[in-house]
Amino acid sequence: MSREELAEPAPGRAGRDAATRDRIVRGAAELVVRFGVAGASIERVRVASGVSRSQVCRYFPTREALVDAVVDFQIAAVLARQCSWLARVESLADLQAWADDVVELNGVRNGARGCPLGALVSQLAEQSGPIRAKLDHAFHTWQSYLAAGLGRMQDRGELNPEADVAELATGVVAALQGGFILAQAARSEKPLRAALDLAIGRVALAVHSARPAARPSNPNG
């Protein structure tokens, strides 16, 4: 270690360490999206992140530790994006706008990438109980953001107060994940659009049932 490195304040080294670790995780996450967990070899991660093999091993002594960090990274990224979008949902129109945004983003990639969390479940759920539990918790959190938006619709009187917002949210997210898989296979956003149209249509039924029926006219005037 050089004299300059020895003299460098600890906070500076800590910041550099954090930046290097973040670069490794981001590089590994991109490889997992492109090639799957099995395709994210240490050598590929080293090249993608622009670090040495020894640095990868320093921050992640085992491949399992690196995969776990990638899972945490993808969970944080997906939930941050969904929280930002779904925090604005207060009406059926807002919910439709969220669905349109999801489909539009998927269409930019011709349906190719799907959902990072769904992909991780299919690859890791049977291999790691702790990772499966993390992903299950992430999906419940995602559903809670959607349920909160549906709850705001109930507060405004737009959604039937008897509607089970948690159940509706689960159905919408389930339809979304199925749509992602079909879109990935078809290389088209159309299956995702169809899945979300059906899911939003189910919510719309609860919206219509919340609206009072038109009062019949009095024939006696």
Image (cartoon, rainbow, N blue to C red):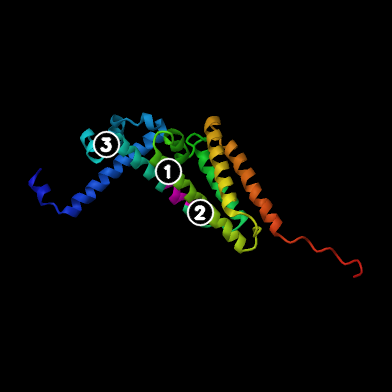
Q: Does the magenta stretch include residue 80?
A: yes
The earlier-in-sequence mark between 1 and 3 is 3
**Residue designated by label 2:** 145
Nearest to the observer: residue 156 or residue 161: 161
Bounds of the magenta segment: 77-82
Q: What residue type is labelled 2?
A: Tyr
**Residue designated by label 1:** 133
Q: Which amino acid does label 1 sit on?
A: Ala
Nearest to the observer: residue 96 or residue 127: 127
- Residue ID at (36%, 40%): 70
Q: Where is residue 44 in the image (x, y as percent from the top left)?
A: 31, 31
Q: Where is residue 198 in the image (x, y as percent from the top left)?
A: 64, 43
Q: Is residue 63 left or right of residue 201?
A: left
- Nearer to us: label 1 or label 3: 1
Q: Where is residue 42 in the image (x, y as percent from the top left)?
A: 29, 31
Q: Which mark is residue 53?
A: none
The answer for how far apart the CA atoms under marks 2 and 3 are is 36 Å
Position of 207 relative to 23 (above/below)? below
